[in-house]
Amino acid sequence: MSLISVQEAENIVLKHTIDFGVEQVPFAAALGRVLAAGIVTDRCLPPYNRVTMDGIAISFSAFQRGLRSFRIKAVMAAGDKPVATEQVDECIELMTGCALPATTDTVVRYEDLIIKDGFATITIDSIRQGANIHLRGSDIQQGATVVSANTIVDATVISMAASVGQTMLAVKRLPHIVIVSTGDELVDVDVSPTPFQIRRSNSYAIQAALRQYCIEAEMVHISDEPQVTKEKINECLNGYDVIILSGGVSMGRFDYVPQALEETGVEKLFHKVQQRPGKPFWFGKHSATASVVFAFPGNPVSAFLCLHRYLMPWLSTTLGKEVRPKIKAILMDDFTFLPQLQYFLQVHVRVDEESRLVAVPVEGNGSGDFTNLLAANAFMELPAEISNFKKGDQYMVWPFKPLM
């Protein structure tokens, strides 16, 4: 099969999103999840006429008639039942957060008062009727949706859920994901490798990235044996919604993954993309289990690029998150790339003195060199039909770290 373009690969991947359903979780444990249903108020907000400053509550009409000194009938704390005034020259001393007594309509601050011998005297010449009061329902009415579906739950959403008494939240169910590494040259992180082995890192990088979506992916390693590869992939197809493979997808003698996927009934939707790094990327779907398979190259930068360029957008779309806006940055150095491939240049994106988003290339030694990912924070996507990229040109970037 010939190479497909990056855009074609993206379109195919996003065409195969899956609805994993909905589950209920305690609101306090929902951080980072995506709401499947909106949060609705069970009463008005605020639920009563709320005092916003410490002071006294009076009837504005009394001030208009010339009264400046008021007898303090009662002192209220937040949460107290309101105490009504009975005489025009009475006031209620109250604190921020109190419910305003129905017989009053204006709050005068302590700063504008002299309080002595049970009386409060107003020391300013003018006050505004309704001052220092947050009116009932002025924020939102009872029964209104305060947080819409598809919102990512953050601290403000949790605060709102608590304020309306919604102890359980309907959220998008997360897919069950397994990360499969391949290759006899790989050993786990707690093993001392021989001079010709390396420690597994791709699986841990992918697992860490998926935690941004509150997903705790499991990990499996497969040795370079065709029958074992087939058996392990078949087990994963029957136990997981999404399989992410790393390695074994190229043209090498020991790259058994494509054949194993075919033999286990996974439909190949594409294999090989017109890009660098990550050209051997393989994507497919199992018709019987509906499992989706992302098979990335084993080179660390290749796997990292495919993860952020394809799998993360697929996951965001699957979970109903808002589509990430296209972000462009200004290339700060000339760059040349001759092959007719879409090149993903590692860059460090920052905001310059003119508040522009600019990208400085980060030098590296190919798709096996992942150390420079520590200095970079994004990939800049350079079009395949261009070879010479000039300083000052703008291109799309795919961040994998916060840009600011």
Image (spheres, rainbow, N blue to C red):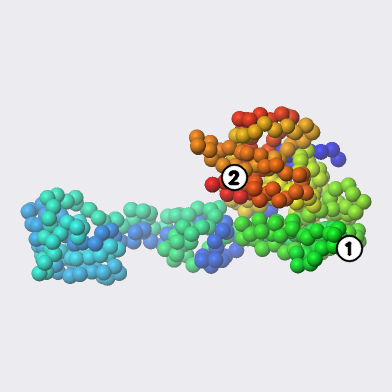
Residue shown at the point (44%, 60%) measured from the top left: 160
Question: Label 2 to label 1, Cα distance in Å?
Answer: 39 Å
Residue 310 shows in the view: no
Picture layout, residue 321 above or below residue 345: below
Residue shown at the point (70%, 57%) measured from the top left: 205
The residue singled out by tag 2 in the image is: 324
Residue shown at the point (69%, 59%) measured from the top left: 207
The dot on residue 237 is none
Residue 178 lies, in percent from the top left, at 74, 61
Instruction: Name the amino acid, label 1.
Output: Val
Query: Position of 232 compared to 253: left or right?
Result: left
Q: Residues within 10 Å of mark 1 (few under 14, many from 20)?
A: some
Task: Report helix, strand or loop for mark 2.
Answer: loop
Q: Nearer the viewer, residue 8 or 22?
A: 8
Q: Nearer the viewer, residue 52 or 25?
A: 52
Residue shown at the point (54%, 55%) measured from the top left: 152
Residue 32 lies, in percent from the top left, at 56, 58
Picture layout, residue 212 above or below residue 310: below
Residue 279 shows in the view: yes
The dot on residue 228 is 1
Query: Position of 2 compared to 79: left or right?
Result: right
Residue 229 lies, in percent from the top left, at 87, 60
- Tell me if label 2 and label 1 are in contact, CB under 8 Å: no
Whichever of labels 2 and 1 marks the residue nearer the N terminus, that label is: 1
Residue 159 lies, in percent from the top left, at 45, 61
Q: Nearer the viewer, residue 219 or 91?
A: 219
Instruction: Name the amino acid, label 2.
Output: Arg
Q: Number of labelled discs?
A: 2
Task: Report helix, strand or loop for mark 1.
Answer: helix
Picture layout, residue 196 above or below residue 271: below
Query: Position of 115 compared to 351: left or right?
Result: left
